[in-house]
Image (cartoon, rainbow, N blue to C red):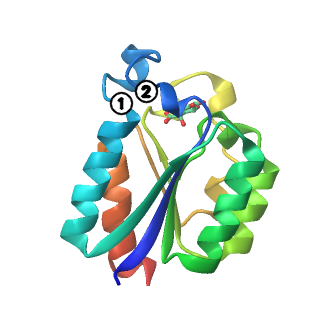
Amino acid sequence: MPDTVFILNGPNLNLLGTREPDVYGARTLKDIETDCRAAATRLGLSVDFRQSNHEGTLVDWIQEAGRTAKGLVINPGAYTHTSVALHDAIKGARIPTVEVHLSNIFAREAFRHHSYVSPVALGVICGLGPTGYVLALEALAGPAAS
Ligand code: DQA
């Protein structure tokens, strides 16, 4: 049984493809999941790919990842900029975590420049679109995460 990486997506990411395509691109979350599954197969990993619009559900899933997964990839959406609860959950999970954003949050509004997740992440990838998810999986399969 290969090691599992949880890939968690926060609020509004279910709307990818139609949501602000000039910012987030034309690809859907299902397309990104397909890319992640192909990368995981290549890397000898298994992925558990989920999305929720609810902060508490994301906390529950991060705790579950801490009990069962080798690592975590998370695009926390807007909760990036607001959620002490996600910060605490990731810290408590004690598994290598990569924070991913499709857009370059530092090239956008000032309120997106602060992340509660970054201080508890192994690394942060932003601005590279869906490729960021694949790069995060590669990082978790490599020496930086062991
Ligand atoms: C996002 C960036 C966040 O600021 C925003 O609230 C999102 C998506 C991204 O992937 O670029 O919902 O996390």
Under tag 1, what secondary structure? loop
Circle count: 2
Screen quadrant of the C terminus: bottom left
Residue at far front of view: 1
Is any part of residue 128 visible from this angle?
no
Identify which residue, 60 or 139, lies in the foreground: 60
2 and 107: which is toward the camera = 2
**Would you say 29 lies left or right of 109 here?**
left
- Compared with 104, 123 (above or below) is below
Q: Residue beneath label 1, please? A: 28
Looking at the image, which residue is at 50% across and 31% down?
A: 14
In this view, 60 is above or below 132: below
| Left or right of 109 in this view: 39 | left
Question: Considering the numbered disc 2 on the image, is that residue within a helix, a strand or a loop?
Answer: loop
Q: Give coordinates of residue 19: x percent, y percent.
A: 47, 18
Which residue matches tag 2? 16
The picture quadrant where one finds residue 68 is bottom right
Q: Is residue 137 visible?
A: yes
Q: Quadrant of the N terminus?
A: bottom left
* Residue depicted at 18% across the width and 68% down the height: 42
Q: Which of the numbered marks, if any, corresponds to residue 6?
A: none
- Three-letter amino acid code of the residue under disc 1: Thr
Check if mark 1's residue and mark 2's residue have beta carbons within 8 Å.
yes
Q: 131 or 19, which lies in front?
A: 19
